[in-house]
Amino acid sequence: MKNKNQFDSRRHFLLKAATAALAAPVLLGQPLKAASASGRLQHACIGVGGMGWGDFNQFKKHANVDIVALCDVDEKNLKRASELLPHARTYTDWREMFKQESDKIDSVNVSVPDHNHFVIAIEAIRRRKHVYCQKPMCHDVAEVRILTLEATKARVITQLGTQVASTAGDRTGVEILKSGIIGKVKHAYLCSNRPGAVAKYRHVGPRPTEGIENPPSHLHWENWIGTAPMRPYVPNIYHQAIWRTWQDFGTGWSGDIGCHIFDAVWKGLGMKNPISVVAEVQQSWQESPERRADTWPQGNHITWTFPGNEKTASDKLTVEWFDGEFYPPKEIRALFSETDYPAESAMIIGTEGALLIPHQKMPVLLPEAKFKSYQQPVKPDRNHYHHFVDACLGGEKTESHFAQSGPMTEAVLLGTVAIRVPDQLLVWDAKKMKFPNYPEANKYIQRKYRKGW
């Protein structure tokens, strides 16, 4: 009973802090500048395998960055990175890294599985370190709310790892939406039907009961599990990339890619907290209690209703998400090409036309003949990681700072809540952080951490 009370107390604390966050005044003072007298950023990489390997290499390329510390639970990952930077100090536990390096570093990047984003990022922020965090910002809605507020109060530089937001395609898409050239927006259709993604990243489950082994000596399994419930190690099931399959560790395909596809639409339309959300899911997953308790479905159709604004055609805006076996309607795909419709994209329908923003490509105004003479306000590519570094050293505001990307991430993660109670319309009270019409879903706003976390 003592352990249960500890869990419940921790969960109550987080939820109370999160609900207070929305009502609290946000004071946007001058961001902190990195303190290094040399004018160089003293940086620590937390997670250098998988996506973290790419992040490490991007930070390493910046002329004014010194990567002074490396942390990863897998010593093989650490060895590979330290061979490139032999003078960087190495750690297998981020908590020990902060104890030893807090007075030696200005910033960190958090490039680990979703379930440990919050505890690492909040520790960094409370130590007044600038934070680059992979998407989604956190595993749970309540964590995002707290992290957003804490980052704003601490005046640290932040950047969500939506690196596509800094590409010419997304940046130009934002400007086109802001221009109003497609008229008042009526509807938005987001999709991520990437070929091969289901087989590679979205295992059917449930978790294996055979093939259990002791973790290899180079993998610190206790630290990898972190805030999640402990489970036995099985090779090639969790570490490195397959953790996204499991609810304890990942946020499903919509949580993973949703922040990318949503970003330009969110910014271009100046969107706020949703009013409601509902999800349709893969039927075989919905009918399997074992899978529903442990994995994410292999296909989702999520529908949010947002409050309208001066850019929308009515007082409400509907945004739909499709992945796996779910696709945008044929008539929507046909506006561009039903057969060549981009597998990952956003289609925004306006009263005077439509805008297609393909993932990692330039936007297209539709019908093309109507907008043939329109000169797109093309914005240049820029390096998402280096833009963060430059901001830490006194440059302009980052593209995906938490005050902007936090509320968007909340909306994306509300979709993952809806997935877990499929076909149930959830009315969202953003201020109280509750679903007043369906309290059973409130438990998914904040999970319970493992003892000691």
Image (tube, rainbow, N blue to C red):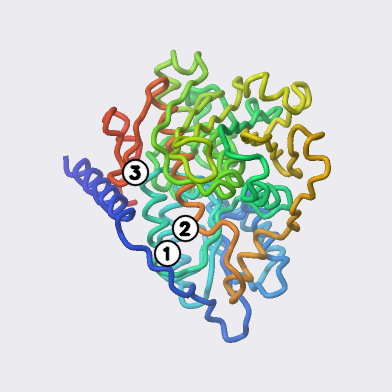
Disc 3 to disc 1, how far (Cα)? 18 Å
Does residue 48 sit above or below 428 in this rendering? below
Residue type at tag 2 = Ala
Q: Residue furthest bottom?
A: 37
Residue 24 in the figure: left or right of residue 323: left
Residue drawn at the location 53% of the way across and 33% of the way down: 319
Q: Which residue is mark 2?
A: 403
Q: Which residue is mark 1?
A: 152
Query: 386 or 250: nearer the eye?
Result: 386
Circle 3: element type: loop
Disc 1 to disc 2, how far (Cα)? 7 Å
Query: Could you tell me residue 448's position as x and y percent?
Result: 31, 42
Query: Could you tell me residue 405's position as x and y percent?
Result: 51, 52
Give residue 418's quadrant in the image. top left
Does residue 145 sit above or below 1 in this rendering? below
Residue 31 in the figure: left or right of residue 41: left
Residue 331 in the figure: left or right of residue 262: right
Q: Which residue is mark 3?
A: 430
Query: Could you tell me residue 248's position as x and y percent?
Result: 43, 36
Residue drawn at the location 68% of the way across and 57% of the way down: 80
Any part of residue 76 in sight: no
Give residue 287's quadrant in the image. top left
The circle on residue 41 is: none
Label 1 packing within 10 angstroms: few (<14), some (14-19), many (20+)? many
Query: 385 or 206: nearer the eye?
Result: 385
Does residue 23 sit above or below 411 in this rendering? below
Q: Are marks 1 and 2 in contact (CB under 8 Å)?
A: yes
Which of the two marks, 3 or 1, is nearer to us in this view? 3
Label 2 packing within 10 angstroms: few (<14), some (14-19), many (20+)? some
Circle 1: element type: helix
